[in-house]
Amino acid sequence: MTAFRASPFAPALVVTLRTIAIVGLAMVVLFPVYWMAVIALTPTGLGRQVMTFFPASPTFENFVTLFTERPMARWIWNSILVATLASAISLAFGTSCGYALSRLRFRGAGLLLIAVLTTQMMPATSIVVPLYMLFRAWGLLDTMHGMVVGHVSLVVPLATWMSKGFFDSIPTDLESAARIDGCTHGAAFVHIALPLAMPGLAAIFIYGFVTSWHDFLFSRTLVNSQELWTAANGISSFRGEYFTLQELQMAAALVFALPVVVVFFVMQRWIVSGALSGSIR
Amino acid sequence: MPFARALLLDRARPMTSAKTASRRSPVTRVLFDGPAFPFIMIVPALLVLGFVIGLPMLEALRLSFDTIALRRPAAAGTYGLHNYARLVSDPKAYAALGLSALYMTGTVLGSVALALSAALLTRRVVRFSGLARIAFLLPWTMPAVVTALVWGVMYDGNFGVINRLLDFVPFVDGRNWLVDRSSALGALIVAQVWNEFPVAYIFFLAGLKAIPEELYEAAKIDRANAFQQFRHITLPHLRFIIAVIVILLMIMGFKSFPIIFLLTGGGPAGATETMTVLTYNTAFRSLDFSYAATLGILAVLASAMLVLGYLRLLPRTGHGDVM
């Protein structure tokens, strides 16, 4: 950099080189998404014959096939149902625990924190094997409510840890003031901390929803009947079933990914700050 | 925000007045103000956690001493340490731990290198900075299942776009990336890095933002070149952020399941059978639930160690105020 400084063109040259590097890297990173769209728009069965980098004769027939010949709409509806329930339940139960971990001193708090974090960070395959056996004994296999339970085990630790982070970031002054005025700690939580954390709680709900929406393992193992599959499981089945029909795979992947992309960019700020507090992977 | 706070205080005031407070029963006081309050707050979550995680963990422990396997139906109910004895001498388990370690190392190195380059490139961009950031965050919004599907199509051995792009590169031949033993794990690592590096990118951007600009100005006056600035200013300031992100990425790599499972299923011939995939395959392909539970417990212990490392680092980064 110092070498260039002598010439008046130096800053412009640095900026140009940097721009080229950014554009190049961005193109590499974005390529898989672009390619997904190219193949999805290619007529069914012709994906392997695309010899340029553009769809030769773009068509939406793959998307139509998904919804007419496969139960894609049903799977998406299942995903919405399971994700909403799992996220709402987790939020309802996780928030108070997150508040306690953030504000209150009690015995075992440190241990609880480690336990919550470990359950959030251990591989889901470890929990799904015993859960499968329990569900088999309880007759919960192949049911929607069973899958909600499974997803709650994914989302509750996350909701607890994330809400702790949000309460940590809210100043305690208001609650202290209310308590000096004679408010109980419980009332301070309900009437002051909760409303202040509302945007955070909304972010947790959405992030929990997305976690459940993305999950593949629980849907794959706990549910067998095709009409109970979630979308993640449904579209993954295309890799086996339509191995040669890449166009359908890519169309399904696009339909499945799009809602999350939209949500993500609407909520970018919250999700980014959540990621920094270590609660989002 | 001050307005919202005033509103909140207004709403809280009527019930915090001395009149209401005196009317409150001692029972309410004990439950919602006293030593019982923390427990009231954590019990609902504890019940749910106990039901969806504690109970399965206990069941896993029980299974690991039992013999629930399709191949030996008569042995059910014979409790003992045999699954653990098998674990200690199982070459597949050691191989899986090694492959997980390799996978973690590869994804951590790849993600850190990619994310750090992207963050250093975009940190001072003024025009179109939002656009550049969106480009580097987009892969993060892709579900693992979608990542697996799209890379599966791109890795296609015959007409995959990666092989076609490699035609333009001299001396590099295309191959059937996911079927070839020597390339399968590397191919999976690339897909995982693509999916997860944005998390590291966010951390690095935030970390870079927190470095005072005056340090660089002083360095420029001292005629330090770009590399020296990176080596003596940027890197030391990012040290803890890098440590935290390395552990987070290790955890993500260790947990990784859908990408590996959907792309190779652990193959070819076990070349990509990491801990998670081995656990799954033992349970749902070999139908040996007891041994799978034992492997699952090993995986939980391994992630608990990573979590402990993470918790030790966390307070030192001041992660809360980097943005």
Image (tube, rainbow, N blue to C red):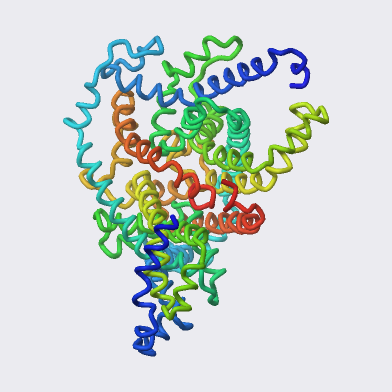
Q: Give the residue at the far left of this rendering.
A: A68
Whole-percent x, y for residue A143 in the image: 24, 55
> Residue B166 vs residue A63: left or right?
right
Where is residue A72, by image quadrant? top left
Q: Residue at x 54, y 36 (%)?
A: B197
**Residue at 32% in and 28% down:** A249
Using the rendered view, name the quadrant where residue A152 is placed.
Answer: bottom left
Is residue B217 positioned above or below A279 on the image?
above
- Residue A84 x/y as whole percent: 29, 52
Q: Residue furthest bottom?
A: B26
Location of residue A279 in the rendering, given as x and y in whole percent from the top left corner: 50, 53
- Residue B113 in sight: yes
Tell me the residue at 61%/37% (across/down): B112
Tell me if residue A201 comes above or below residue B260 in the rendering: below
* Residue B192 in the image: above or below residue B94: above
Is residue B98 left or right of B226 when viewed as pictured?
left
Residue B72 visible in the current orientation = no
Closer-to-camera residue (B286/B192): B192
* Horizontal side of residue A139 vs A124, given as left or right: left
Question: Is the N terminus of chain B in the top left, top right, bottom left or bottom right quadrant?
Answer: bottom left
Image coordinates for residue A138, horizontal then vertical, percent: 28, 65
Q: Could you say which is closer to the camera, residue A280 or residue A195?
A: A195
Q: Residue placed at 40% from the left, 28% from the top?
A: B150
For the view shown, which residue lies furthest in the right direction? B222
